[in-house]
Image: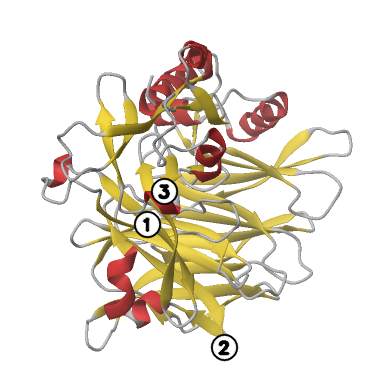
Amino acid sequence: MSLKKIIASAAVLAMLSLSGCSGVSFSMEELLAAPKLTDEQSQIHEALISAVGRNITLKYPKNGSNRSAYVIADVDGEPTEEAIVFYEYTGAESEGIRVNLLDRRDDGEWYSVKEIAGAGTDIDKVVISSMDTGSKLNILVGYQNPTGDNILEIYNYSDGDFDRIGSDSYSLLQTIDINSDNTDEIITIQQTTDSETGTSSTKAYLLRLSDGEIIKDDGIDMCEGVASYVQAYTGKLEDGNAAVYIDEINSDGNLQTEIIFYRYSALQNPVQLRQEKMLSQCTRPVGYSCADIDGDGVYEIPSTKAMLGYENAVNEEQILKTTWCVYEDFYNLTSKYSGYYSVSDGYMMAFPSRWNDLVTVKLDSETDEVVFYKYDGDINADMTELMRIKTTTKEESEEYIYDGYEIITSKGQIDYLVKLPTNKRETLILTIDEVQNSFYPVEY
């Protein structure tokens, strides 16, 4: 079973497991995203409907780490936690999303403190973070709108009062301590229009809180010709400083990456500043997202070219060789890994140095395996097989192990297996240790 089929099956199982939820209505999207209510969430839910009634539909964030309609955190610095719940009233016209903060009394009973009207029709993401030195945690909610930019609203809960303390628009939103001051800042991407000339430009801005007020810098330019912003990743550069890596779709339909970091008391964007040098190296087909391949916190940016033997094949039939690069100072991208990347099965097999310019890949459609060959100048000729990789479930892997496969590594319920030829006279054939040391499950 391929990883794509496994993911689809998991989604169906998740939907079936949720059929017992009651008290609110759910969309199909919410059924796929939402787990059953925990005992604590059930108590919060009962307190919520006591305050606002039963005719509500829970709303779930579409992005970010907080994907529940119930976000539980200590946002006021007191011993007990609070709950932030997102919903809309069923049947009401143009009422929009509501955000309700609930707290606990001394006896442990939940109660609604206050309901506030949100700023959109859906929720992009929810972030709970300390944005101000010495302050309590803030609640950041990004709202999606069918037209126009998303809206960021920042809430604060202090001394029993739940309030909105600021808002701004954005196309993309990420929080990170980008200037190493031990508090998080907000990085937003926004399109602005000059009121005098009518011309539009896109900039990245740094927002921070100071004494409860939003402070916004002048921003830095982003590359032009971007159709949409896909995802932002928080990581670091090779020198250890924090950075945000932004994947975006350009006007040609390809994926490209820009890098934002903080230096000389301002944000920096080296890809935009040296587009003629860097942009082509940061552009590749959709699906090849940047990733922290080896888990060191530094994100690698992929670029692709045709694998040996596929140089003249049409795009649909090409198999690509992927090179993963890291950014270094003075507008340089340095190659760190190069090899075969499986977008669908979520792994990268780095080619050892002795494989360079000697190895290619074919897909075995009958066995759903990736097969590595010694390239002899003709992709259609009989080539020497070096190994084959199989992605399967744990419960199915035993039959492959019995047939001579070995486990490279596992990720959740997925096993990655390799079968190496028994004839080891070919010097390009790897040992199992070499395979394991060159194999990377890709996490996003």
Amino acid at the residue labelled 3: Phe
In this figure, what is the number of numbered marks? 3
Amino acid at the residue labelled 2: Tyr
Q: Which residue is mark 1?
A: 323
User: For residue 351, which numbered disc appears in the image?
Assistant: 3
Q: Is residue 150 visible?
A: no
In whole angstroms, how far apart are the C-alphas of marks 1 and 2? Answer: 31 Å
**In the image: residue 313, left or right of residue 168:** left
User: For residue 264, which numbered disc appears in the image?
Assistant: 2
**In the image: residue 306, left or right of residue 237:** left
Q: Residues within 10 Å of mark 3 (few under 14, many from 20)?
A: some
Q: Are marks 3 and 2 in contact (CB under 8 Å)?
A: no
* Residue 172 drawn above or below residue 122: below
* Residue 279 drawn above or below residue 150: below
Q: Quadrant of residue 420?
A: top left
Q: Residues within 10 Å of mark 2 (few under 14, many from 20)?
A: few
x, y percent for residue 407 = 54, 26
Query: Which of these two is toward me, 319 or 85?
Result: 319
Q: Mark 3 or mark 2, which has the lower sequence index?
A: 2
Q: Secondary structure at mark 2?
A: loop
Q: Mark 1 or mark 2, which has the lower sequence index?
A: 2
Residue at point 52%, 54% (across, down): 292
**In the image: residue 350, left or right of residue 213:** left
Q: Are marks 1 and 3 in contact (CB under 8 Å)?
A: no
x, y percent for residue 229 = 35, 59
Q: Residue furthest right?
A: 106
Amino acid at the residue labelled 1: Thr
Q: Quadrant of the N terminus?
A: top left
In whole angstroms, how far apart are the C-alphas of marks 3 and 2? Answer: 39 Å
